[in-house]
Image (tube, rainbow, N blue to C red):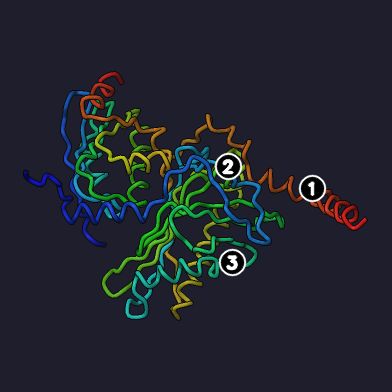
Amino acid sequence: MSDETTEMPASEEQAAARDATNWAKSVSRLNVSEVPEGAVNINVEGRRLTSPIQGFGKMWQKTYQVRIPADRISNTDLIAVWKQRFPAFWPDGNNFYGPLTGIEPGEVALLNMSLPGKMKLSTGVMVLYADQESFTLMTPQGHMFAGWITFSATQVDENTVVQAQVLMRASDPIFELGLTLGGHKQEDQFWQHTLTQLAAHFEQEADVDTQVVCVDKKRQWSRWSNVWHSSAIRSTLYTLRAPGRALKRLFKRDRAVA
Amino acid sequence: MPEAATTFDVREVSDQTRVIDIKGDITAQSEDVLMDAYGRASGDGVSAIVLNFTGLDYMNSGGIGLLVTLLVRAQRQHQRVLAYGLSDHYRQIFELTRLDEAVGIHDSADDALAAAGRS
């Protein structure tokens, strides 16, 4: 009797292994396993992920790049450092509460962002994809934009080219207005700062090359109701209710002592 | 940039429908070849672009981004985008990224072409 076990070619095996480890497992709604101290989980738990297809505003592709001499850091080593110290390169006042396991496919991180007017925005991201040369964060419903950001590093000639690329639509009409009235500029500054700090970590003074392309000028008016999930509105309401929550906690503590 | 390890062949199956046969990997480096293939596929009167993923070896998040861009370009031309030949894994990726809400996914070439013919 012949052995009819079929073997997968080595290249297919490798591809299947990459698939299994690099992509997040399919989820219908996000689940935050642990909320670190200081983080706020009002706009992530139970939310669905959103691609640019589900967003409201114009669709943009924004690419930010810096070059670092390859003899200083290889692309894979750079990505390893970036994953490990991801929030360290962000502008002050913005917090990324990543899971203890680090940036791994499927992990969910909570974000507390600073917006103009001392406004705080509580939102989050899920790690959609991660390999040795790149990782991608995808946004949930209610985030300021629907889409993802891919961070990558490639070896080009004598340089390690480091890139952050955002593919996005504003989630709802309020965020679209906000982006138009200075939000895009603030976002550009955010990633330019991040890449400058990342390059500085490797002792490289770098100018950030920024390219902004409007992929689709049309707004998707059928998505206006995304505003229902708006993290801006919910974060503001959460902040306004803070005194009430503090009183409630105090009352509960007093009753427990009594 | 590293050269894209991918080929995209375009087939005309009817006046309204073109099939793009994908072979190899789809990553961010595939942008030029994919958009070139879309340009060749998208002529006057074409109302459906069918992506044949049977020969797909690997796709990363950059590749998914390219598909979103292709989808937007097709929608601007009032074309539908359909797909077949996706492995279970990539079907799940389409669901995860919610690309399946805009791309019609089919089990076989016959199903996809029949759906394209109805567009």
Q: Which mark is residue A46?
A: 2
Would you say A68 lies left or right of B58 here?
right
Label pair 1/2, CB-CB below 8 angstroms: no
Total tally of numbered discs in the picture = 3
Going by the numbered disc 2, the residue's amino acid type is Gly
**Up/down of A201 relative to B8, above or below:** below
x, y percent for residue A175: 60, 44
Closer to the camera, A162 or A18? A18
x, y percent for residue B40: 20, 38
Q: Secondary structure at mark 1?
A: loop
Residue at screen point 84% across, 50% down: A248
Residue topped by disc 1: A241
x, y percent for residue A138: 48, 50
Q: Nearer the viewer, mark 1 or mark 2?
A: 2
Closer to the camera, A216 or A127? A127
Q: Quadrant of the N terminus of chain B?
A: bottom left
Q: Secondary structure at mark 3?
A: loop
Going by the numbered disc 3, the residue's amino acid type is Pro
Most extreme residue toward the top is B118
**Up/down of A196 relative to A137, above or below:** below
